[in-house]
Image: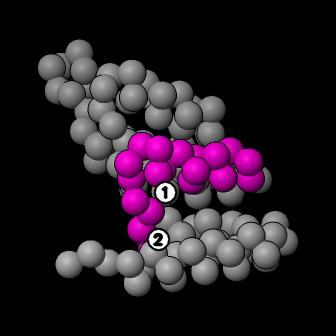
Amino acid sequence: MCSSGMLPTLMTYSILLNGFSKHGHLDEALKLFKSMKEKELEPDIILYTILIEGMFIAGKLEVAKGLFSKLSAAGIRPTGRTYNVMIRGLLKVGLSDEAYELLRKWKMMKHNVII
């Protein structure tokens, strides 16, 4: 793609990350994510959510939680989908207290809208 003069977009990365993540190729997904950042293309919430979901699918709880915690540092606000992925992932591994706390924070954030 790059050799033909076409540069990958966020959509391109989203498609590739989604495929890698859903099929358990997490090393490739993380390499792609890292290379994207090295090319100064900042990941958006869609990319983070795809990667977080992939980590939960692979049983990499701490990596998923780490990615979620990096969102605020990156200035990215989680979407309802992101919270859904996190809450479902936490519940699947029996962390219902953490899932409930995250749900509580999400509800509070939804009500903190600035007009």
Q: How many marks?
A: 2
In the rendered structure, the answer to whether residue 87 lies left or right of residue 38 reads right
Q: Which amino acid does the dot numbered 2 rest on?
A: Arg
Residue at the image point whose x is 45% and y is 75% from the top: 109
Badge 2 or badge 1: first in the primary sequence: 1
Q: Are marks 2 and 1 in contact (CB under 8 Å)?
A: yes
On whether residue 29 falls in the magenta region, the answer is no
Residue 19 seen in the current view: no
Depth check: 20 or 73 in front? 73
Residue 27, position in %: x, y?
63, 32
Which residues are the magenta region?
Answer: 60-81
Question: Quick one: quadrant of the N terminus?
Answer: top left
In this rendering, the answer to whether 32 lies above or below 70 is: above
Residue at the image point whose x is 33% and y is 37% from the top: 42
Q: Residue furthest left?
A: 5
> Which residue is denoted by mark 1 in the rendering?
49
In this rendering, the answer to whether 115 lies above or below 71 is: below
Residue 8, position in %: x, y?
26, 33
> Which residue is denoted by mark 2 in the rendering?
81
Residue 13, position in %: x, y?
36, 41
Quarter-of-image position of residue 78: bottom left
For the residue labelled by badge 1, is the local secondary structure a helix, a strand or a loop? helix
Label the magenta part by its dominant secondary structure: helix
